[in-house]
Image (cartoon, helix red, strand yellow):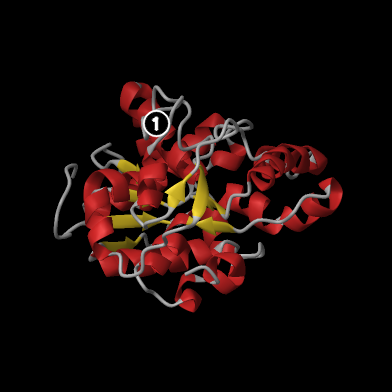
Amino acid sequence: MGGIVMESSLSYALYLGCMIANEEYAYEMSAREVMRELGVELVDLEGESCCGSPIRSLNTKLWLYLAARNLSLAEKTGLDVLCLCSGCFESLLEAKHFLDSERGLKNWVNRALALEGLEYTGKCEVKHLVQVLHDDLGVEVLRKRVKRELKGLKLVSHPGCHLLRPSRVLRADDPEDPRKLDELIKASGADVIDYPEKLDCCGAGLLLMKPEGTLSFAGAKLKSLAARGVDGLVTVCPACHLVFDKRQGAISRQMGIERIPVIYYPQLLGLAFGIEPEKLGIHLNSSPVEKILSRI
């Protein structure tokens, strides 16, 4: 389904995962609004479950089963999978890599799936929102839909770990010098500022076991950005967003840094498209996104 199109007739099986469906509602709201504006059909994946990532280190086969189950549900729609969550994207794509490479694993998982009348064949592709917008639709298509250019905004991107690594499997962008999200931000008319900490982890992986470590990881990045005077940080992962947005108050109190707006990319694009902020879930953001709204 690759290639850039001028007028969209694209359809995808939307996989939300756990975090977006249960906590990060703004990501789903804004993605649906933006895709509707672009004419992209999103087919809800009926019966979807967890991607399996949280239990991967405890039970590899159960992780593979859960991932394969979701992929087999997508295969029934005849569509490629669109992931909003970078962690789910990595989990499903890595599972697909192993299942497609090891016939024994594929046979095992299909015996388990047969109990639900499902079968994994490996026919569908797994794509992240960044790939769909940048590679399938194309930056120019987005730019032509912009009704309100976000000129004068100085923004930075946080591509996050799970969109880029392991690079031998994911291949969503250059793992050492990712540019796709930057180019998507520029389509809105905003300026993108490069910075040395761009590839640094948000620390979400430590949130349950060592939350002070999360605050330290994210705080170091936010402190650097605040010192640079940027107008906002753009995210494409619910875990990263949760840390930088919802935990920013605690980080600010602990480190004494000025708070900055954190916004999902489809929220930003939706504003440039002229979509009402409420429809994009802007009111659900915890960081001071009103600073961005006041500039447009």
Q: In the figure, is residue 144 to the left or right of 150?
A: left
Q: Quadrant of residue 199?
A: top right
Q: In the figure, is residue 4 to the left or right of 282?
A: left
What amino acid is at disc 1?
Leu
> Tag count in the figure?
1
Place of residue 6 in the rendered image (x, y in percent of width and height, measured from the top left): 14, 55
Q: In the figure, is residue 198 to the left or right of 36?
A: right
Place of residue 146 in the rendered image (x, y in percent of width and height, measured from the top left): 30, 65
On screen, 194 above or below 150? above
Name the residue tied to disc 1: 170
Residue at (31, 56) in percent of width and height: 13
Q: Quadrant of residue 215?
A: top right
Taking depth in this image into account, of 275 and 81 the one nearest to the observer is: 275
Local crowd size for mark 1, using a 10 Å CA cut-off: few (<14), some (14–19), many (≥20): many
Taking depth in this image into account, of 257 and 101 the one nearest to the observer is: 257
On screen, 180 above or below 117? above
Residue at (82, 41) in percent of width and height: 212
Taking depth in this image into account, of 211 and 252 the one nearest to the observer is: 252
Place of residue 191 in the rendered image (x, y in percent of width and height, measured from the top left): 44, 49
Q: Quadrant of residue 58?
A: top right
Quarter of the rendering occupied by the N terminus: top left
Q: Does the image show residue 118?
A: no
Looking at this view, name the residue that lies furthest to the front. Answer: 152
Taking depth in this image into account, of 56 and 262 the one nearest to the observer is: 262
On screen, 144 above or below 194? below
Q: In the figure, is residue 295 to the left or right of 45?
A: right
Callout 1: SS: loop
Q: Does the image show residue 224?
A: yes
